Image (tube, helix red, strand yellow):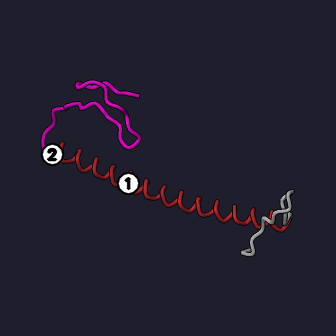
Amino acid sequence: MSLPNFAGNVEQSDSFALVPLVLIPMNIDDFKQFLSEFGQLVLISSQEFKELKEQIKHLEMLIRTKDEKIQELECLQNHYFNDGDAICNSEF
């Protein structure tokens, strides 16, 4: 998807999104407050992102563990494929 801007079309990326810049007259104190609140929002988003990455890592580990358990149970149920090749390892 492309987004128009003053220089032409710019491709949208998954890592960022272009937003139109709107200039709003404000005094310096209001601007400082805005920057402070924006900074807090960025920190919160960054922390949420880190937490989601940790959750994903945990779920990937859980899936690997369950896959290994399924493989072990399948091995115990049926030691050989139809062609007679052993599918079980001595690891289990």
- Residue at 84% over, 66% down: 79
Q: Nearer the viewer, residue 2 or 50?
A: 2
Tell me: residue 56, above or below residue 68: above
Residue that carries the numbered disc 1 in the rendered image: 46
Q: Label 2's element? A: helix
Find the magenta span and give its range. 1-30
The answer to which image quadrant residue 21 occupies is: top left
- Residue at 24% over, 50% down: 36
Tell me: residue 12, above or below residue 61: above
Q: Label 1's element? A: helix
The answer to which image quadrant residue 63 occupies is: bottom right
Find residue 80 and report its horizontal and vertical position in percent.
Answer: 84, 63
Give the quadrant of the N terminus: top left
Find residue 33 and report its horizontal and vertical position in percent.
Answer: 21, 47
- Of the two numbered discs 1 and 2 on the same chain, state the one appearing first in sequence: 2
Mark 1 neighbour density, 10 Å: few (under 14) some (14–19) many (20 or more): few
Q: How many marks?
A: 2
- Residue at 70% over, 65% down: 68
Tell me: residue 12, above or below residue 91: above
**Horizontal side of residue 19 vs 48, given as left or right:** left
Q: For the residue marked with disc 2, what is the amino acid?
A: Asp
Q: Nearer the viewer, residue 10 or 82?
A: 82
Find residue 7 and report its horizontal and vertical position in percent.
Answer: 23, 26
Q: Mark 1 or mark 2: which is in front? A: 1
Q: For the residue marked with disc 1, what is the amino acid?
A: Ser
User: Of helix, strand and loop, which mostly describes the magenta segment?
Assistant: loop
Q: CA distance from mark 1 to mark 2?
A: 26 Å
Would residue 17 be counted in the magenta stretch? Answer: yes
The answer to which image quadrant residue 82 occupies is: bottom right
Residue that carries the numbered disc 2 in the rendered image: 29
